[in-house]
Amino acid sequence: MKKLLSIALLSTLGFSADIMPYGAYMDYSSAAYKDKGYIAGIYGSFTKLPFKAEIDAEHTRIKYKDKFNIDDWKQTDLTLIGHYFQGYNFAYKAGIHNIWVKQGSESDYDKVFILGALYYKYLKYNVGIDAYYSDYEDNGGFNVFQISPKIGFNFGNYYSETGSFYGELKYNHIHINKDNITPKSNYSNVDIKLQNFKGPWTTTVNVSFGKSAYKVANDGFVVYTTGDEYKYSAGLSVNYALSKKESIKAGYTKSKYNNGTDDCYSNVYTLSYSRAF
């Protein structure tokens, strides 16, 4: 109740807010060391132009197959990102993604620093670049630098039979500054996103191809920390607007990765609920 009252107070002061609790279930193929995993989190955004703040808190637990006798992977993430909108065409962001990992008696604190700039024409196109510096000094003593230029464009007619579309292409260059952490020190990876907007439905298809490791994804909110070398992923999500302020979303993503000895597959099922204030 206190939380809702606080959000209502922000609204009266000219702030808009969006709160989204979410969860996910993961399972893995027979060749994987991992057996299954769970994610629970809550995301919030708070906007009063020209500023916007995003906060995401998440906990992940991954269980390994009994025959490998590996302790559960327990990870807690806290992401904070601030945005500044300059006029009607420029946007800038800066933030940090904090990661606390515990596995058996071992514990680490890692962090990712986030910077980004975007030029956009509303409902037409956008061009931007994001940069990430991942500090794993507490977990093996190495760093990862990633730069991700991107371009997106809108097309179609929302009121037509097929609705309107948004497409985005992103290139990720990842450099790991220490040998023997992964099979390679440099990775090139491409993300493609296509969205369709029709009535209360938003359908999104995501494809990522090209090898990657320790990648930062989803604009800084997702970090691949286990060191697996990913080869591709493909996902589908469907969002349904229950009203102007409420929506639910379900998604599925399949990925292929190498765990150091074998090629493996993961399946991730997600469900979220969003409420605007």
Image: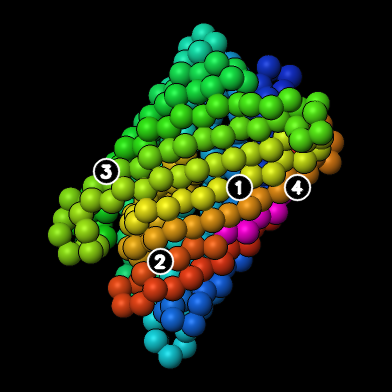
Q: Is residue 51 visible?
A: no
Q: Can you identify the residue that label 4 sits on?
A: 248
Instruction: Please report contact status of discs 1 and 3: CB closer than 8 Å, yes or no.
Output: no
Under tag 4, what secondary structure?
Answer: strand
| Residue at 47 percent of width and 37 percent of height | 169
Q: Which residue is mark 2?
A: 257
| Mark whose residue sits in front, 1 or 4 | 1
Foreground mark, 3 or 2, reads 2
Q: Residue 170 sits in which quadrant? A: top left
Question: Badge 4: few (under 14), some or many (20 or more) residues near its Cα, within 10 Å?
Answer: some
The quarter of the image holding the N terminus is top right
Give the residues in magenta. Answer: 245-253
- Residue 165: percent from the left, percent from the top? 66, 32
- Write down the residue under mark 3: 145
| Residue 250 locus on image (x, y percent) | 70, 54
Q: Earlier in the sequence, mark 3 or mark 4?
A: 3
Amino acid type at mark 4: Ile
Residue of label 1: 205
Residue 188 placement, left or right of 98: left
- C-alpha span from label 3 to label 2: 21 Å
Nearest to N terminus: mark 2 or mark 4: 4
Q: How many marks?
A: 4
- Secondary structure of residue under mark 1: strand
Up-down relation of residue 266 to residue 171 (above or below): below
Taking depth in this image into account, of 138 and 225 the one nearest to the observer is 225
Closer-to-camera residue (67/41):
67
Can you tell which quarter of the image residue 140 is in? Answer: bottom left
Q: Is residue 45 above or below residue 52?
A: below
Secondary structure type for disc 3: strand
